[in-house]
Amino acid sequence: GEDVEQSLFLSVREGDSSVINCTYTDSSSTYLYWYKQEPGAGLQLLTYIFSNMDMKQDQRLTVLLNKKDKHLSLRIADTQTGDSAIYFCAEISGGSYIPTFGRGTSLIVHP
Amino acid sequence: DARVTQTPRDKVTEMGQEVTMRCQPILGHNTVFWYRQTMMQGLELLAYFRNRAPLDDSGMPKDRFSAEMPDATLATLKIQPSEPRDSAVYFCASASGGSGGETQYFGPGTRLLVL
């Protein structure tokens, strides 16, 4: 089946930029998502990008998509302690109702 | 603002007992998903419904799990009998269900501990 891979942990210093990476295998992916999960909570949609785009910016968040390499990244500028959470990458193919989620990357922000 | 609600938020039970988890999707959403999250397996899709009809429950252990949508505002997930390996966080999510690719909105989850 299709697969989405993420590294499990990322540690950054407060104020630095964080870059969370994701690779996927489905060449027909049409939507790619980043979700954030805070402790004790459900997944919350952060941002998404269509496969015909290569970049999307939303305040401190920048999403980069390299469709040729099937690589998606999420950059968080000026990372704060409140950004500490698990970040999930997900992809879905057009016409499908079921996204494929990665295992999640735990972002740890330290002073 | 519209959100998915789940009850109970936490459940502790003994092995062999029946567990029922409930979910209220966002009003107007016609696609509902049940997921299970554990440290070992990550996020697993158990079942999903579209217009209240089950479309895929291949991720669910059939002998003990059952999922239903009695009406458009309620989805249930039952485990009978429960086992310690069922301990996990169970999430419900809903989507507007157009032509595909719709964003899923997750509930806060039910944290289940089976002793």
Image: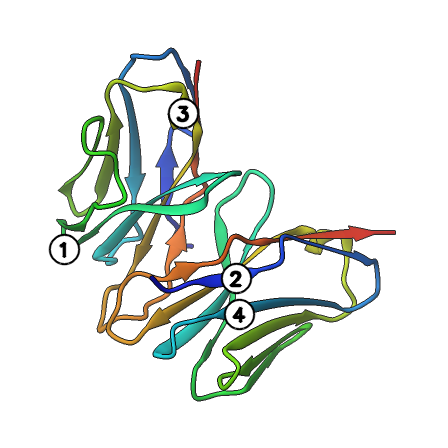
Question: Coloring scheme of the render?
Answer: rainbow
- Residue hosting label 2: A5
Distance (Cα) linking label 4 and label 1: 32 Å
Question: How far across and how far down the image is residue B9, in percent?
Answer: 44, 30
Residue A102 located left or right of residue B3:
right
Secondary structure of the residue carrying tag 2 is: strand
Tags 4 and 1 both on a single chain: no
Residue for point 50% across, 78% down? A70
Residue for point 38% across, 73% down? A26
Amino acid type of the residue that numbered disc 1 sits on in the rendered structure: Asn
Question: How far across and how far down the image is residue B97, in percent?
Answer: 24, 64
- Label 4 vs 2, first from the N-terminus: 2
Is mark 4 in CB contact (under 8 Å) with mark 1? no
- Residue hosting label 1: B51
Quadrant of image for the N terminus of chain B: bottom left
Amino acid type of the residue that numbered disc 4 sits on in the rendered structure: Thr
Is mark 4 in CB contact (under 8 Å) with mark 2? yes
Question: How far across and how far down the image is residue A89, in percent?
Answer: 51, 63
For label 3, count other residues whose C-alpha is less than 10 Å away and answer few (under 14), some (14-19) or many (20+).
few
Tags 4 and 3 both on a single chain: no
Distance (Cα) linking label 4 and label 3: 30 Å
- Residue hosting label 3: B85
